[in-house]
């Protein structure tokens, strides 16, 4: 009996540790979706989040550019959304009973020269996804062009650990943080050199965070907090002999 109780207690503790930091999906909301980038999504590379080549950085073709109402000046970079074409609203162009999960990697700018219901799809305050074409065609029929959707923000499931790419110059470290699971989007970042304490970084643009410290010749650790309040520390992930333009992969994930 004592052994059974101990097992139950252990199971409860394990459940707590496994689920405490789990990202909770949002409720369902309505939007519209178009597509861009071509059938191979080659036109989606780069983008306002700074992820560069989406193939090599692990995001692939299941990505989207977000309208102003969703993009939040880059704070939404890395967030994941489950999207379903609203078949009840548009049975002609929606594929029934399928969904696709995408990562926010770009910004869909407003086009005030066109009305919001005829070309200005990303004009505020509209919630709109301009999806990579291969992702969009999972839920919509090509000829439709634009479809009504329902969506929810969901946990991001990424392969491997979080990655840090060091760009910039002396006294200006510009760190691109990619392949973030869980909430996907980053709320705050701190960096610690082997000769410094923890230093707050600021968002420069998209998923790029900057420090104005001189960290050359020092190993670097990062403390990353995602938008759901979960914090992970990546100790000495960047070695002392680091160089600008190099990427360092961790074994740790949200």
Image (cartoon, grey):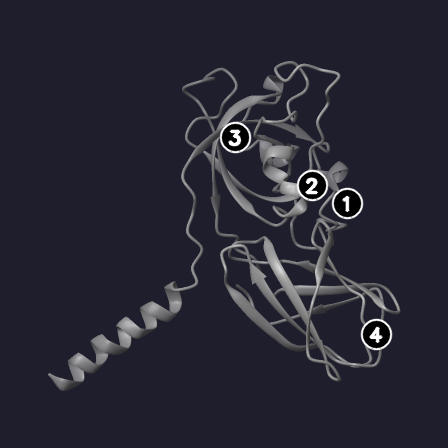
Q: Which residue is mark 4?
A: 214
Q: Which residue is mark 1?
A: 46
Q: Nearer the viewer, mark 3 or mark 4?
A: 4
Cα–Cα span, label 3 and label 4: 48 Å
- x and y, in percent, of residue 115 in the image: 67, 14
Image quadrant occupied by the N terminus: bottom left
Cα–Cα span, label 2 and label 3: 20 Å
Classify mark 3: residues with Cα within 10 Å, few (<14), some (14-19) or many (20+). Answer: many
Element carrying mark 3: loop
**Which mark is first along the chain, 2 or 1?**
1
Q: Residue at x 65, y 50 (%)?
A: 59
Near-viewer residue (6 or 140): 6
- x and y, in percent, of residue 77 in the image: 64, 48
Element carrying mark 1: loop
- Residue 138: image tag: none
Question: Does 215 sit above or below residue 19?
Answer: below
Near-viewer residue (223 or 91): 223
Q: Which residue lies most toward the left here?
A: 1
Near-viewer residue (131 or 199): 199
**Which mark is first along the chain, 3 or 2?**
2
- Residue 139: image tag: 3
Q: Nearer the viewer, mark 3 or mark 1?
A: 1
Cα–Cα span, label 3 and label 1: 24 Å
Residue 214, quarter of picture: bottom right
**Which mark is first along the chain, 1 or 3?**
1
């Amino acid at each position: 009996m004592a052994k059974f109780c101990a097992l139950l207690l252990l199971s409860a503790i394990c459940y707590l540790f496994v689920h405490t930091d789990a990202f909770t999906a949002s409720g369902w909301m309505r939007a519209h979706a178009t597509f861009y980038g071509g059938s191979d999504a080659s036109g989606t590379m780069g983008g306002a989040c700074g992820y560069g080549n989406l193939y090599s950085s692990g995001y692939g073709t299941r990505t989207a550019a977000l309208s102003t109402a969703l993009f939040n000046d880059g704070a939404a970079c890395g967030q994941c959304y489950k999207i379903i074409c609203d078949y009840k609203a548009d049975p002609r162009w929606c594929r029934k009973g399928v969904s696709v999960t995408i990562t926010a990697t770009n910004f869909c700018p407003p086009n005030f020269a066109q009305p919001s219901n005829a070309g200005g799809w990303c004009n505020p305050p509209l919630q709109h996804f301009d999806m990579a074409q291969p992702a969009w065609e999972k839920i919509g029929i090509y000829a439709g062009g634009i479809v009504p959707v329902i969506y929810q923000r969901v946990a991001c499931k990424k392969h491997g650990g979080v990655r840090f790419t060091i760009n910039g110059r002396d006294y200006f470290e510009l760190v691109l943080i990619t392949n973030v699971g869980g909430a996907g989007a980053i709320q705050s970042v701190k960096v610690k050199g082997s000769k410094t304490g923890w230093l707050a970084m600021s968002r420069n643009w998209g998923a790029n965070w900057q420090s104005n410290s001189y960290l050359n010749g020092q190993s670097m650790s990062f403390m990353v907090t995602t938008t759901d309040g979960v914090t992970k520390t990546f100790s000495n992930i960047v070695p002392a002999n680091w160089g600008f333009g190099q990427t360092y992969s961790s074994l740790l994930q949200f």
